[in-house]
Structures are given as structure tokens and as C-alpha cells.
Image: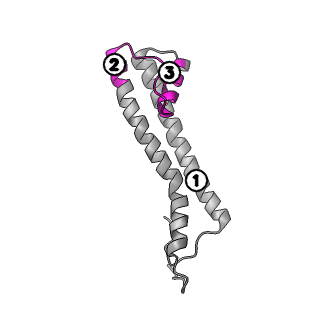
Amino acid sequence: MYEHRTHRPLPLAAFVARIGWHAALSGVIVVASLFAGMAGYHYCENLPWLDAFLNAAMLLGGMGPVESPQTEGGKLFAGLYALYAGLVFIAVTGIMLAPVVHRVLHRFHWEHGEQSSD
């Protein structure tokens, strides 16, 4: 997926494009997670869509729910969604940092000799 240490680092324009793709993937994951959370709060806790959005967004942002769940299904969903939201945060952070960390490490380990044809 990324260039080998025997290859030159990507030009700046290609690196920015790579970051753009990673940001787009992260955005898709966050939006899909937000919609899943909204649906869960709406159907399990019978919250209106706007309140479901607020609760899901607050959990994804790491702040916690605004309204405490009242039903058993809502409590179960809120707990599972909170665990999921924490994993999404870790995954999205990794996706966004991967190209930057790779570029820094690639600069340190780049073999300046002959470039392979692979």
C-alpha cells in the first residue's frame, strides 16, 4: 500500500492526496457510526431523530450521552455503542496518523542507493 524503503518518498502533492483519501475513509466511518447510533437511540430509546443525533454525536465525541437511557434495550444499546465509539475513535486516529507516521519513518529509513524497479 505504501512505498518500500528503497523507493523515494512520495512527492508532496501525492502525499496530500493520500492524506485526503485517509480523511475521506475516516469521514465515512464516522458518518456511518453516527447514523448507526442515531438509529439505535431512535428505535431502542424512542428518542426523536434530533435527540438521537445529539446523543450519538456526544458519545462519538467522547463526551457521553446527554440523556440517560430509560429502557433496558436503550441501556444495553448505549453501553455497547459507547464501547464501539471508543474503538471508532482509536481506529480513525490510526487511519489519520498512518500516512504521517509512515512518511516520517520512511525518511529515516530510506535507502538512498539504487531504486528497485518493483
Say which of 93 and 45 sits in front. 93
- Mark 3 is on which residue type? Ala
Q: Which residue is mark 1?
A: 21
- Mark 1 is on which residue type? Trp
Of the image marks 3 and 1, the number of the one nearer the N terminus: 1
Q: Which mark is residue 52?
A: 3
Q: Residues within 10 Å of mark 3 (few under 14, many from 20)?
A: many
Q: Residues within 10 Å of mark 1 (few under 14, many from 20)?
A: some
Q: Is residue 82 above or below residue 4?
A: above
Q: Is residue 57 above or below residue 90?
A: above
- Residue 67: in magenta span: yes
Of helix, strand and loop, which one carries label 2? Answer: helix
Q: CA distance from mark 3 to mark 1?
A: 29 Å
Q: Residue at x 54, y 59 (%)?
A: 99
Residue 93 on image: x %, y %: 49, 48
Q: Which residue is mark 2?
A: 73
Of helix, strand and loop, which one carries label 1? Answer: helix
- Residue 55: in magenta span: yes
Q: Residue at x 52, y 29 (%)?
A: 57
Q: Residue at x 44, y 14 (%)?
A: 46
Of the image marks 1 and 2, the number of the one nearer the N terminus: 1
Tags 2 and 3 touching, CB below 8 Å: no
Q: Residues within 10 Å of mark 2 (few under 14, many from 20)?
A: some
